[in-house]
Image (cartoon, helix red, strand yellow):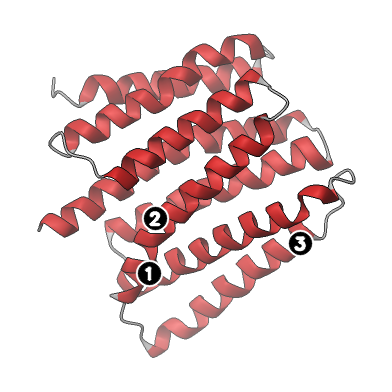
Amino acid sequence: MKPHTPPLILYFIASFLCVLFYSLNLDNWVIYPKAAVLPSIFYYYYINNNHKITVDKAAVFILSFIADMYILMGFDSSFIVAECCVVMVYLIIIRYVIKDFVTSKLRKKDAIPIAVALIFITYLLVTMMTLDFMNERRFFFLFLFHGVVLAVMGKLAIVNYIAKGSRQTISSVLMWTCFALSDIFYMLYHFYLPIYIFELINISAQVLCYFFIVRYFLRTDHMVNS
């Protein structure tokens, strides 16, 4: 068995248990597997990257872990702390997506799919921001900033994929898709309509996004070192 295999197995087991416990309404049990999700996928990345990690990528894992734990603990300040951590994670990751975009070479035939993607993401952002989130207008500008950052990341990731179509750009699109699903259904469940399936989709997308973050980072590191 390769050294990176055990942490990857632990990650998938912990992720599966998170989703299972949520689906069975065993919310008090979720904290145990959830606490293992990020450390295991971080160790998987660390081993695969020859025991090297940059400060900003380490910050992504640390901030994500803090956000997860604050949400699970349910402190009065949990939402604000978690939201700030998530936005900082997005701001770090979007730097890498922008670097990919700078090296992308667009063709004329890419114009239509790019336009469709840009219109769809803009429509999605506008639709979400016009919902009445149980009168939580005090968070409107925070939601707006969060949404704009995520929308810009998504647009750039999709443009990069259309222009290049590499494993790196595929990973970035899948990573962004998980971000979007997790954030949209978190907001729908907690601030709009508390349907349990929304929370289940949020949790599933959230734990899966960490895998694609790591895949994207590994592909980025490979491109830098090659």
Give me the residue at 55% from left, 15% from top.
31
* Separation of marks 1 and 2 at Cα, in angstroms: 9 Å
Crowd band around label 3 with a 10 angstrom C-alpha radius: few (<14), some (14–19), many (20+): few
For marks 1 and 3, the one nearer the N-term is 3
**Tag 1 residue:** 160
Q: Please provide percent x and percent y for residue 220.
A: 25, 54
| Vertical order, 44 against 102 (above or below) | above
Q: Is residue 68 left or right of residue 169?
A: right
SS class, disc 1? helix
**17 sits left or right of 58 in the view:** right
Q: On the image, numbered disc 3 is attached to which residue?
A: 127
Element type at mark 2: helix
Q: Amino acid at mark 3?
A: Thr
At label 2, the amino acid type is Ser
* Circle 2 residue: 172
Find the residue positioned furthest to the left.
Answer: 226
| Quadrant where the C terminus is found in the figure | bottom left
Circle 1 crowding by C-alpha within 10 Å: few under 14, some 14–19, many from 20: many
- Does the CB distance between marks 3 and 2 fall below 8 Å? no
The location of residue 186, given as percent across then percent down, is 68, 39
Q: Quadrant of the N terminus?
A: top left
The quarter holding residue 188 reads: top right
Query: Considering only vertical position in the picture, is 221 above or below 103?
Result: above
Give SS at disc 3: helix
Q: How far apart are the alpha carbons under marks 1 and 3?
A: 25 Å
Q: Given contact means CB atoms under 8 Å apart, are the residues at marks 1 and 2 in contact?
A: yes
